[in-house]
Image (cartoon, grey):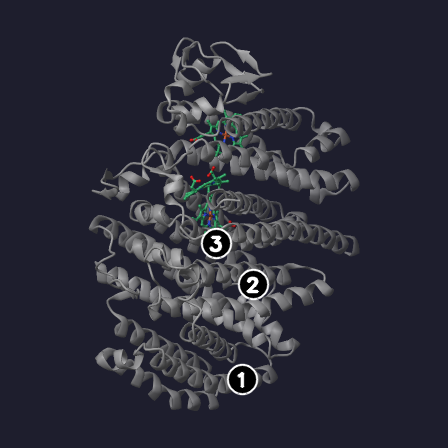
Amino acid sequence: MIILAFIFIGVSMLLYVLLGGADFGAGIIEIFTDKKGVNTISKAIAPVWEANHIWLIVIIVILFNAFPEVYSTITQYLHIPIMLALFGIIFRGTAFTFRYYDPFSDTSHAIYTFIFKLFSVFTPFFLGVTLGAVIFGEINTASGISFYQQYIAPWLNLFSISLGLFIVILFAYLASVYLSGEPADEESNKDFKRLSKLILIALVITGGLVFIIAEFSGLHLLHKFIKSPVSIGCGVFATLLLPAFLIALNRNRASLVRIIAGAQTGAILIGWFAAQFPVLVVLQGSPSLTIYNTVAPDKTLLMMIIALFVGLAFVIPLLFYLFKVFKFSEKTNTDY
Amino acid sequence: MDDFLAARLQMAVSLGFHIIYASIGMTMPFFMFVAELKWLKTGKDVYLQLAKAWSKGVAIFFAIGAVSGTVLSFELGLLWPEFMKHAGPIIGMPFSWEGAAFFIEAIALGLFLYGWKRLNKWVHLGSGLLIGIAGVTSGFFVIAANGWMNSPEGFEWINGRAVNIDPFDAMFNAAWISQSVHMIIAAFAATGFAVAGVHGAILLKHKESQFHKNALRIALTFGAIASLIQPLSGDYSAKDIAKRQPEKLAAMESLFETQEKAPLIIGGIPDAEKKEVKLGIEIPGFLSFLAFGNFNAEVKGLDQIPREDWPPVLLTHISFQIMVLFGMIMAAIAILFLLFRWKWEYLLEKPWWLRILTFATPIGFIALETGWMVTELGRQPWIIYKIMRTKDALTPMPGIVYPLILISIIYLILTFLSVYLMRRQIRYVHEKRLNS
Ligand code: HDD
Ligand code: HEM
Ligand code: HEM
């Protein structure tokens, strides 16, 4: 059951990255597109953004339910980057909605758009920084150390920042891939495609950077990765898909492109989880928090898993229906 | 400001903000559903326009509800990590169910808002109803968690740790039913009055608008029915806490001494130091009756409770008075409305009546906020009633006043912006209708 709870976190995280991530990414892409592209973006996200972001809430609920100490440790010591990410979530979500629903297009639209773009970068950056801090291992639970050491140093370091950057670029990449298949005019489609190639290059570079910085900061990520066969497999798989991705992109196979990009992201995530297993939070000076030493009692796990499965039984068909109606249908005239 | 006070204030600001949007998100879908149903049945375009106009408002409020809710699910840990470390596994289950309900709600919302042309009419109507049902369900689940804080069950507390956890018992705690029923009805009452008030104000200017007449009628029908049930449900809540949390009852009624034939005090300013109430009106025996259904019953006063375990008497008492006062006003307006609808239709269009409704726009929400103050302040000093003190759950991180200030400013701005946007929506609907 512990493993099942762990898998649920992993799956929710993957879905959050793929769906919520692409949603954030769409805001990042907007920085590089013209008016027409912006329109495509707005129409593509509006019906699904709310549902996409609930995966984050699912992750949080599983954490405090099944691994309460992980939740309380993260929220306690990473208060600052989490709060910053939350501010970003507030600003971005409301700016997007306001822009969509403000019936008059005057200067206010420019302001909403500015805020939306800015926080589309800001929010995933701090989510990434938080994630980086969780892996990095500078969280120190000892008492009597300085404010800086306890609440700032764990996340304000090169590694966490590089991971934040990586997440931002990953999200932008996912979005460009999705959008290049959205029904729009030829022109914007081409733009999105060109963008996704550029972003892919940036992604590979920052990915490498994360590993190099980890090595220099004494976090032997590469070493961990090599030790786990699953991680190696995932790494190789993601790399092998790169040429396939480029071919599919050039041949205009929109859905294949999306699937490959999704598979690559999945592979990176699974690889990372496998390398990390069973650790959830690395601490400094005390044993890491693993899924075994923080797990809630069996009865709690069972009840949670039942709730999740029953929930999924309702949610999955509805979700498919939602995506079918809005994402794969041929009609292009969305009205609201 | 010390961190403890800042954290409590931040929690109060965040919850008090979220609950407004959550209440609207739970209940407006039902209003839209009725409007759309009327359109399908009568074929009158004005109902379709109403359903569409409302749905845009709901989309805006829903988004704010969703982001502020996301903030809350982190804030529980950001501010009270020690609480969540113990409470998480006990009350996680209702939160898991709540998550599932949110999902359904968000999906149904997507279908409803963007599917006017893509979905079959009846499927579309059904998606509207589904938003409402899922919203109310999620409300029920969150309140289970709050009920548990008031009436902790489903575990044993041994040496500062919870053992033998039974999430099922925890979820079906003694406070759950009375709280969630009272809250859901409150959401309908508050939203109904607020929506009716807005349309009433517009009707004062545009007397002949069928659009706003219909809107007012649908909203106030919901609001009126809810406001008539609310005092009954509130009475049930009061009887419930008389048994479970006597210190909360004593604080909200400012009963300093345990007594038989306890008086109901209306108004007044309690002074916790002198243990007396200034300026209040006393009705002998009535509190005993309200709490136990018997004019002679003994009601426990604050004298039986150690001083350090008293809830803040002044604020709890005043909040309770405001809730009940506004509840009575709402019930009175509700009776008038139903009477007029039944016999004297022409009165519904009189300016004085519309003016009353305009004034009543915020009172449902004020009652709702003060009601929560009663529940949450009356639970103090405990975060988990008689198990864990609020101050022991506080995060050790210093400087909480900064996020408090930021959050308050952001929520203040969002409040203004949502009003501003509503006005623009209304103006837009007007201009479009004048041109067509
Ligand atoms: C429209 C809003 C509204 C109105 C008109 C009323 N209430 Fe209320 N009341 C609430 C909205 C509310 C609330 C915000 O929904 C609370 C807070 C927590 C809860 O469960 O409901 C609440 C709590 C609450 C409690 C505390 C329950 C607890 O802590 O478990 C009591 C005893 C009452 N109410 C009693 C009444 C009475 C006797 C009313 C008579 C008119 C009344 N309420 C009207
Ligand atoms: C949405 C309506 C709600 C409002 C307006 C509200 C209001 C408040 C207020 C005013 C406080 C501060 C009390 C004080 O410290 O003096 C508070 C505290 C708190 N509330 Fe609520 N509350 C609401 C619902 C809930 C629910 C559903 C939960 C359950 C998960 C909850 C959990 C908490 C917690 C954990 C605290 C902090 C600890 C404490 O002060 O006791 N609240 N709330
Ligand atoms: C009495 C108290 C509460 C009620 C009745 C309530 C109800 C709701 C409803 C109906 C929604 C749907 C969004 C909307 O309509 O705007 C919502 C959103 C949300 N609420 Fe609350 N809520 C309450 C308190 C809380 C608390 C204490 C938490 C967290 C601990 C919370 C977490 C959330 C989250 C995460 C969302 C976002 C879900 C989404 O993305 O749609 N709520 N709430």
User: Mark 1 highlights which residue?
Assistant: A195
Q: Can residue B102 be spotted in the picture? A: yes
What is the C-alpha distance between the residues marked 1 and 3? 33 Å
Local secondary structure at mark 1: helix
Residue found at x 61% / y 77%? A37
Nearest to the observer: residue A312 or residue B155: B155
Nearest to the observer: residue B314 or residue B225: B314
Residue found at x 72% / y 42%? B210
Q: Residues within 10 Å of mark 2 (few under 14, many from 20)?
A: many
Q: Residues within 10 Å of mark 1 (few under 14, many from 20)?
A: some
A323 displayed left or right of A309: right
Q: Can residue A331 be spotted in the picture? A: no
User: Mark 3 highlights which residue?
Assistant: B71
Label 1 with label 2: CB-CB less than 8 Å: no
Please state the quadrant of the image where ligand 2 appears. Answer: top left
User: Mark 2 highlights which residue?
Assistant: A92
Tag 3, which chain? B
